[in-house]
Image (tube, helix red, strand yellow):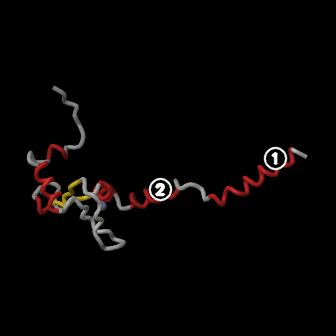
Amino acid sequence: MPTGWVGSTRRSDLPKDWPKIRAQRLMIDGHRCQHIRVDTDRLCNARATDVDHIGDRDDHRVEMLRSKCRYHHQQKDSRLAGEASGRARRAARDAAKPTHPGLLSPALKQSHDRHSRGHE
Ligand SMILES: [Zn+2]
């Protein structure tokens, strides 16, 4: 009998008929993400793959759930951990953007000059 099992107990908190409740909520919401975007004030409307608790985490009634796309479900979870995490993620994404092609031309020109000189 393993005794060292530590971790999230969330799965075990869910009721036995959770898959049924979840499917019911997805059907009510038409499998569309119910997250209201702050920038447009409109529903995200992406294909919902997850169901989120809008009230207490232990309140599994259908009316206390909302369908969410994977992105917004994760976003809510990370918001609970700290409001700044979204901003940090956005900053990291911007930093990963490829260098603007225009910035490459001086280097290309340089190597071209070196190349021409080699032929003289
Ligand atoms: Zn969404």
Please give left or right for residue 43 compared with residue 87 in the image.
left
Q: Residue at x 19, y 28 (%)?
A: 2
The residue labelled by disc 2 is 93
- Report crowding for label 1: few under 14, some 14 to 19, many 20 or more residues within 10 A (C-alpha): few
In the rendered view, tell whether residue 44 sits above or below residue 78. Answer: below
The residue labelled by disc 1 is 115
Amino acid type assigned to the residue bearing label 2 in the image: Arg
Q: Residue at x 70, y 57 (%)?
A: 105
Q: Residue 14's x, y, as percent? A: 13, 48
Q: Does the beta carbon of the residue at mark 1 sit less than 8 Å from ligand 1?
A: no
From the viewer's perspective, is the residue at label 2 or at label 1 nearer? Answer: 1
Q: Residue 22's x, y, as percent? A: 15, 53
Q: Which mark is residue 12?
A: none
**Quarter residue 106 falls in:** bottom right
- Report crowding for label 2: few under 14, some 14 to 19, many 20 or more residues within 10 A (C-alpha): few
**Quarter residue 81 falls in:** bottom left
Amino acid type assigned to the residue bearing label 1 in the image: His
Is 51 or 23 nearer to us in this picture? 23
Count of numbered marks: 2
Q: Residue 17's x, y, as percent? A: 8, 48
Q: Residue 59's x, y, as percent? A: 12, 57
Q: Assign a secondary structure to mark 2.
A: helix
Residue that sits furthest to the top in the current view: 1
Q: Assign a secondary structure to mark 1.
A: helix
- Give the alpha-carbon distance from disc 2 to disc 1, as whole Å: 37 Å
In the rendered view, tell whether residue 93 sits above or below residue 38. Answer: above
In the rendered view, tell whether residue 42 sits above or below residue 2. Answer: below
Please give left or right for residue 111 compared with residue 37 in the image.
right
Q: Residue at x 36, y 62 (%)?
A: 83
Give the position of the N terminus as an image quadrant: top left
